[in-house]
Amino acid sequence: MRDAIVIGSGIAGMTCAIRLAERGVHVCLVSPFPSERSQSVLAAGGINGVLSEHEEGDSVACHIEDTLRGGCGLAGRKAVTGLCESAEDIIRRLEKAGTVFSVDENGRPLRRAFGGQSFRRTYYCGSATGKHIVSALVMELRRYEARGLVERKLWSCFYSALISDGRCCGVILYDETKLDLIPLTADAVVIATGGQNAMFGKTTGSTQCDGYTAGKLFTQGVELKNLEFIQYHPTTIETKQKRMLISEAVRGEGGRLFYLEDGRRVYFLEDKYGPNGNLMTRDIISREIDAAGKTVWLDISFLGEEEIMRRLPEVRDLCLKYIGLDIAKEPVPVAPSVHFFMGGIAVHLNHETNIKNLFAIGECASMYHGANRLGGNSLLSAQYSAIVAAEEIASRAPAGGVPDFAAELGEGRAHLRKLKESSGSRFPVTYIREMLADTMREDLGITRDEASLRSGIKSIDYYLSLADGINYDSSVAMHELYSLKAILQLARATLTSAESRRESRGAHFRADYPCEDDSYAAATIISYDEGRYSTRLDEERKYES
Amino acid sequence: MKVKILRQVSPFSESYWETFDADVPGETSVAALIDHINYNDDITDETGRPTTRIGWECSCLQGVCGSCAMVINEVPSLACETFVRDLVKDGNGTITIRPLRKFPIVHDLVVDRSSIFENLKKTSMYVEEYRPSSKAKKAKQKEELAHRYQTAKCLKCGLCLEVCPNYVNGERFLGALFANDCYLVSSRNPERSAEVGKQYAEHFAAGCSKSLSCMDVCPMKIPTIASMAKMNRKA
Ligand SMILES: Cc1cc2nc3c(=O)[nH]c(=O)nc-3n(C[C@H](O)[C@H](O)[C@H](O)COP(=O)(O)OP(=O)(O)OC[C@H]3O[C@@H](n4cnc5c(N)ncnc54)[C@H](O)[C@@H]3O)c2cc1C
Ligand code: FES
């Protein structure tokens, strides 16, 4: 193909743009803000891979098995094999791009332990791995920008996809500098817009990850997958502005979780799961903390100030700054929070959606993590998925002509005009977004049941009925206004998917169906047709080919 | 407490000050304070006159993305890690907030920092082939690595440019973030050192009067002076 539009410039979007440019494909990289502001910079703990030099006993096969086991039977073996086999190449390329990995005395990259993994295979940059990868990729990408192969389009947001006869030939963007919708066409479109953290209000992620793009595409006929699998990270702290992540690296470096009973520390995870109890997978630990019903603390102070400053300096700074507590001296109170989305846009092995020439990569796509993601695997999958999609696009013949989309554009403009011209009492979208977040946290928590999910769906239907009728506050950014409805529709799809899975598996725990049930050992696919949300299990494993 | 904000509807309109009343605990960050003002049914200024919501930019809300850079009580700062307790005493007093002055205003506190990225592109701040020198002694390598680690954390937030007495609009002098990127490129690929050195001389060394105020406001505490020393040594 000759050209592609990549929506989103986090680690996935940048990696895809770089690989496409290397292959001579012209890229337009779209995001409202530069890559430095993407959620990817928040990634702390590290990236997984078994390199030629590895811990004794470890192997790529073992990385594959750990990932499949973590995913509780829902991640496809073929996809996961490709992911783990490419890890060495991906990490070596990151080194070559200048990523400042933490190294030992001899300059060899260091590894740390991460949850759910049999060996130490998480490579890291202190506790700011995502930031360092982003910095390196930004520079690498700049080389292709300077050559004119990649054009960055800032201040622009995805509005909708241009789809005709099951084929995508471009997008409509909202351009904040022109305050208007603009159409953009290309042979292929790649969606790399990250997860949907903001749907849950305060989480560990970025406010930019609102789920709008996945929600809008859903209403345009794109199928979504496994939305019910939402990772709650067990160790986060509450602050006035958000829930902040205490990286799993703390437990990887030996951190212990406990609660107090009669003034005595109870190391409940070690008591139940043995000496490695603190490194069980995130779904298990989050449920155990939830079940403990008491304040749970995370202690790493025994490592001493010097080691903490060497291995976890950013975690120490964060706690000092936001809760005034020094992890080198005392334990931190922690609780689970929404953190990562295993589900998202359904894609085939080549990362194409059910719409031809429309691809999805990174956290917005669902492929490698099944019912629960292992920490350190998503920085890897963000890049691997990007490379797979780029190679596919580069190897294809250019797409045919572009149909006339004047009607879609006209409709879009009329819709925005209506929002802008809202008069009467001005209703801030934030109110509905806040109510939505409350509903999602309450009804789609770590533990769900039929009643909570039904009640959640009822609430969302109510918010949806308001969305068309309210007088919007036109002083807020246009993206905030037009995004509301599709975000609600994505929320509705998420609750519907959770309701349809009447079993417990990985991160999806149903109090009314507490056991795993073999008849559900397949991905949930949800589709939309004029207000109807239909789920099915992908029993033929259509999305694993 | 009073919160006085410099506002502007669009790039083409006049700016104006507006003052709000707010009552929040000291541990509230300025980011949460703006949110607090915005999260009201009818938002009014201190005189009770209805007004519009304040535009501002955020993403990570924990000081690692640079979105929320603005000038708070005359100090260029990140709103999400500047706390009310450090700005007013016992909740009394005025917090003054204005957008960064060195960039075009988009809306209220939102500015267009595209020039930062355009300039890095124009001056070819990329590595090409990664060939770090391996000749240096171990101790030196360790020190280099530590400096690279710190420098690569640059948020491109623009606070160093805002505070700099020499940075005007990014037409010639490109400021501390440019000096640090020069160091990163030449340390990753010494073969580009000469070329990068030339850019450094023209777009940084010739204009820097070493006030070093950039280091005081850098949220990542990047020791720009060390990058300067390394670049000068290379030249
Ligand atoms: C606090 C935290 C710590 C983490 N730590 C780790 C870790 O240690 N290891 C690990 O493997 N994973 C970690 N993760 C997960 C990992 O960081 C993410 O899964 C990964 O970075 C996602 O990258 P991405 O490129 O898919 O998305 P993002 O980085 O979220 O990028 C999304 C991009 O899309 C853009 N965008 C969004 N909406 C639109 C729109 N409508 N139009 C145009 N553009 C849009 C955004 O501006 C952004 O540029 C962590 C996540 C968090 C939140
Ligand atoms: S919002 Fe990211 S630095 Fe403030």
Image: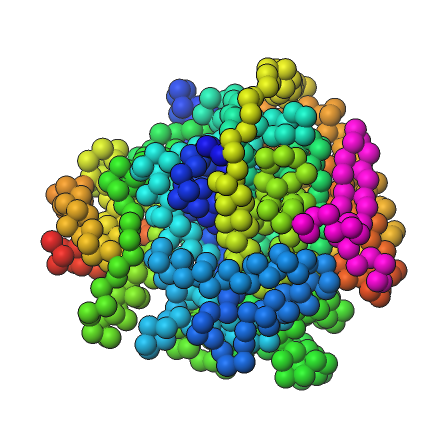
Query: Can the viewer see residue A195 in this picture?
Result: no
| Of B27 and B9, the residue lying toward us | B9
Residue lying at 39% horizontally and 29% vertically, measured from the top left = B105
Depicted A543 relative to depicted B2: above or below? below
Quarter of image, res B69:
top left
| Of A368 and A273, the residue lying toward us | A368
Q: How is the image coloured?
A: rainbow
Q: Position of residue A362 (x, y in %)?
A: 56, 49
| Of A349 and A237, the residue lying toward us | A349
Residue segment shown in magenta:
A517-545
Q: Position of residue B40 (x, y in %)?
A: 62, 36
Q: Position of residue B100 (x, y in %)?
A: 36, 37
Q: Position of residue A440 (x, y in %)?
A: 73, 48
A523 within the magenta span: yes
Quarter of image, res B189:
bottom left
Q: Is residue B169 left or right of residue A129?
A: left
Residue lying at 59% horizontally and 50% vertically, measured from the top left = A363
Query: Can the viewer see residue A359 in this picture?
Result: yes
